[in-house]
Structure formats: C-alpha cells, structure tokens
Image (spheres, helix red, strand yellow):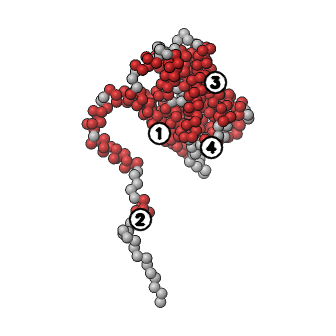
Amino acid sequence: MTTTKTAPPQAGHRDGDDPEQSAQGWQFSSPLVLTMVLLVALVLQGSIRTALSTPVMQSWMTVFVAVMVQALPFLVLGVLLSAVIAVFVPPSFFARALPARPALAVPVAGMAGAVLPGCECASVPVAGALVRRGVTPAAALAFLLSAPAINPIVLTATAVAFPGKPQMVLARFVASLLVACAMGWLWQRLGRADWLRPQTRPGSDGLGKGAAFWGSVRHDVMHAGGFLVVGAMAAATLKAVVPADWLSLAADNPVVSILALAVLAVLLSICSEADAFVAASLSQFSLTARLTFLVVGPMIDLKLFAMQTATFGRDFALRFAPATFVLAVLVSVLVGEVLL
C-alpha cells in the first residue's frame, strides 16, 4: 500500500488565504484613494478653507480654472478627431492626400492646419493619430505646430484684438507657418525614429467601429487630460508667484522684452483662441515682442510640453520643445522686422 505525503503548510499561511493575494499585499484602488482623500478633506476642511482664501491661492485657482476651461473643449475636439482618424479613416487616404515626398508633404500638412478650428490642445492628439496612421512624422509635426496658430478662429481673434493693424494678422500667419514647416524639415533631416514613440492604442480587433471609437476616446482623454491638468497646475503656480512689475522692467530693453514675452507665453499656457487679447493688453511691449508671444505660445508651453510627452514620449519632447522655442523666437524677430 502506498501512502501519499502532503507538504507541510508554509509558515504564516492559513487555510482560506489566497497565496497570490498575500504575496501582492495591499493594493490601492481608485475608490479607496478617493475615500481617503475625501476623509482627509473633511477632517482638514477648516485649514483648507483658510488656505484657499489667501490672495495667492485665489490667483492660483483663477489661473488654473481659466486654463482648464479654455483648453478642455478643444482637447475634447482633438480627441474626437483623433478617434475618427484612427477608426474611420483608412490609411490609404493619407497616402493619396499628401505628396509622396516628405519634403513636399511638410508644407502641404502645414497649410492643412489652417482649416482645423481648434487650439494646441486639439492638435496634439490629432498629430499623434496621423503618425499612427502612417503619415510621415515630419508632416504630422508641421500640422501640430501650424494648426493652433493659423486656423481661421485664431486669425479672426487676432484681427479683433489688434484693430487697425492687419499687418499683425499677416505677421502671425507667416511666422507661424514658417516655423511649422522649418521644424518639419528639421525633423526629417535630423530626427530619429527611436525618439518618437506614439502611445499605443488598446486592441480593437473584433470590435465594432463604435466600440473602437469610444475606446480610443477614453484612452486619449485619460492620457492627454491628465497631463493637461499637470500643465495647468504648473502654469497657475508660476503665474501666482511671479511679480507683475517684472514685466514693466523687461519692456524697456528690446532684446529682453522679446525673450520675456517668449518665456511668458510658455509659462502662461494660454489657449491660442485667447492669447491675442492678452498680447494686445501688453501695450508697453513692442509689436515684435508681442508677435513673439503669439507665435511661441501655440507651439510650446507648459501644458503642451506635458501633452507632447504623453503622446510622443519624453525623448521626443525634450528635443522638440527647445528647438521649437528657439526657432519660433528667431523667426518672429525676422518677420516682425520685415512686416511690423
């Protein structure tokens, strides 16, 4: 007769315990985190109310809410367009719509940005969808930079903000398109494939077009929306702590004024549909400096850098953003000297 030996129970293991669960330990879920945050807020509500009533925090909240309210509708528009491109537009369409040569596809894509009535928050997910659909990255990046700066809504807002100065609208259009095309050609010449890593999408095999569409929308909202919040928080923090009188001191020097408004455009992270009115209010600065503000802002700011990191990867953003900033400043100065 044979006997079967059973392994002794492991130390610390009790009947009914799940070994995998014991090995994993505590796992925080979203409802648990939300409950903990609400409990902390309830206990500290007096201190929180006092902190939020200070002028600095009120300024912070105002800027944060303003950036989010301006950007969120256009982010949603961009996400919807991105999902449409990913699900309903066949890859062969882009092969027919754009020239086969990347050097010619760049200006065509740059001019195509003039027909999308959205801001930079919309252009980032759309450009990501174009890359995933096989569009040459140089052309997609030219579209990313041109769409928020030369579309009809932005140009109309610029004309309204600068009445009697049609040259400001022309200068913004020319400078923005030149920067977009130059960055596209620069990426074609020097860019590397391993720098550009677009976020993958959840598999849609076996799903209907409707299910695949909403799956793509949810994915983009979670990724781009989260980084938008981070960028808005950073912009609000910098706006609340930078003294206002620094701008008046910077306006007296032509070189410093241009650099100051370029940096300010990055920090404020204003939606391109509204930035012309902010630029018009900075009347102590020259038109060239204000043109730099209008060209730099839609191409690189805090929320855009965060969204580009989320969409294309950190290696891309760390190279693309500084190059865009430098080129946008140089082109703005040249165009401003000629047209303004």
| Mark seen at residue 178 | 3
Local secondary structure at mark 2 = loop
- In contact (CB < 8 Å): disc 1 and disc 4: no
| Mark seen at residue 194 | 4
Answer few, some or many: residues within 10 Å of disc 2's Cα (few below 14, many 20 plus, some between 14 and 19): few
3 or 4: tag closer to the N-terminus: 3
Amino acid residing under circle 3: Leu
Q: Is residue 18 left or right of residue 111?
A: left
1 or 4: tag closer to the N-terminus: 4
* Residue in view at x 33 percent, y 47 percent: 36
In whole angstroms, how far apart are the C-alphas of marks 2 and 3? 62 Å
In whole angstroms, how far apart are the C-alphas of marks 3 and 4? 26 Å
Whether residue 175 is visible here, answered yes or no, is: yes
In percent of width and height, residue 190 lies at: 66, 36
Whether residue 217 is visible here, answered yes or no, is: no
What residue is shown with label 2?
18
Where does the C terminus fall, quadrant-wise? top right
In percent of width and height, residue 220 lies at: 53, 40
* Residue in view at x 62 percent, y 20 percent: 174
In whole angstroms, how far apart are the C-alphas of marks 2 and 1? 35 Å
* Residue in view at x 50 percent, y 20 percent: 256
Local secondary structure at mark 3 = helix
Q: Nearer the viewer, mark 3 or mark 4?
A: 4
2 or 1: tag closer to the N-terminus: 2
Amino acid residing under circle 2: Asp
In percent of width and height, residue 51 lies at: 30, 33
- In contact (CB < 8 Å): disc 2 and disc 1: no
Going by the picture, which residue comes out furthest to the bottom? 1
Local secondary structure at mark 4 = helix
Viewer-side residue, 41 vs 96: 41
In whole angstroms, how far apart are the C-alphas of marks 1 and 3? 31 Å
